[in-house]
Amino acid sequence: MKKFNNVIVRRPCKAVCDGITSAPELGQPIYEKALKQHDAYIEALKKCGVEVTVLEADERYPDSCFVEDPALITKACAIITNPGAESRNGEKDEIIGAIRKFFPEDKIEYIKAPGTLEGGDVMMVEDTFYVGLSARTNEEGIRQLGEILNKYGMKCVQVPLEKVLHLKTGVNYLEHNNMLVSGEFITKPDFADYNKVIVPEEEAYGANCIWMNETVIVPEGYPTVLKAVQDLGYETLIVDTSEFRKIDGGLSCLSLRFWA
Ligand code: CIR
């Protein structure tokens, strides 16, 4: 099954070492290493048969390599979000140019203040979009997203978050009804009907894998997750994201994946 033919990424900037983090004990990312890991990420995406648009680094925004957050792309429209983290809010104005290359103006929607939303809080399962109510995404942002999605015949389901930064920090859909779940998501009733693959606590970061046209990209260093994904029958590719992990970033955050 080929669902994505395009991906947008942004190169990490030197200021990536100052990205927002909830885990300062892991140390700051090392720019040169982050670049190498980003190179490998792009190569892995290309192996999955997609065209990769690489945006230039933007030194004004330390977290700007996490392009998943300022935009959300669906099969019918693109949505420019309104990131709830103040230092990241301006990223929404910098992603529009890339989005306009793929979507006409009447298919670009906007989340507006006081609504806030970050793409990391949104998980697409066919025409249903699960949205985390988080420190970054508020009720008004979710209400606006619901209105936009309904207009195009899609819907959203609100999922209150307890501990994690973003929804997809802990739950990711691998198509074919398969879902990787960790921590607070293991018992959430919203996901009861999926084939849940439970990620052990010590590999929680590994729950952030991405399905790319029947290949699943798995972060390096999470053997239980890797085996579980392979046992489901997927091809896998492994990418080291340890520098991005230091600032709470993972595989999904680093790209916008879509069909255009
Ligand atoms: C942040 O706190 O916003 C960044 N340091 C990490 C963003 C990760 N993005 C994502 O999960 N979609």
Image (spheres, rainbow, N blue to C red):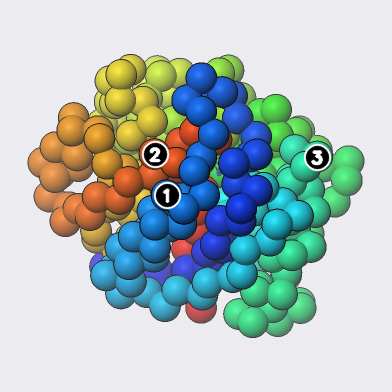
Ligand 1 occupies quarter? top right
Sort mark 2 into few (<14), some (14-19) or many (20+) by Cα contacts within 10 Å: some
C-beta proximity under 8 Å, tags 2 and 1: yes
Compared with 135, 162 (above or below) is above
Q: Mark 2: which secondary structure?
A: helix
Which is closer to the viewer, label 3 or label 1? Answer: 1
- The residue carrying pointer 3 sits among few (fewer than 14), some (14 to 19) or many (20 or more) residues within 10 Å by Cα, namely few
The residues bearing labels 3 and 2 have C-alpha atoms spaced at a distance of 25 Å
Q: Secondary structure at mark 1?
A: helix
The quarter holding residue 42 reads bottom left
Where in the figure is residue 89, as x and y percent of width and height? 78, 48
**Residue indicated by mark 2:** 242
Marks 3 and 1, the one that precedes in the sequence = 1
Query: Disc 2 or 1, which lies upstream in sequence?
Result: 1
Q: Is residue 193 visible?
A: no
- Which corner quadrant of the image does residue 73 belong to? bottom right
Amino acid, disc 1: Lys
User: The residue under label 3 is which amino acid type?
Assistant: Glu
Q: Is mark 1 within 8 Å of ligand 1?
A: no
Q: Is residue 134 visible?
A: yes
In the rendered image, the quadrant that contains the N terminus is: bottom left
List the residue tagged with mark 3: 86
**Res. 33 mark:** 1
Tell me the amino acid under the disc marked 2: Ser
Residue 41 is situated, as x and y percent measured from the top left of the image, at: 37, 59
Residue 24's place in the image compared with 10, above or below, is above
Between the C-alphas of marks 2 and 1, the distance is 9 Å
Q: Position of residue 71 (x, y in %)?
A: 65, 58
Q: Residues within 10 Å of mark 1 (few under 14, many from 20)?
A: some
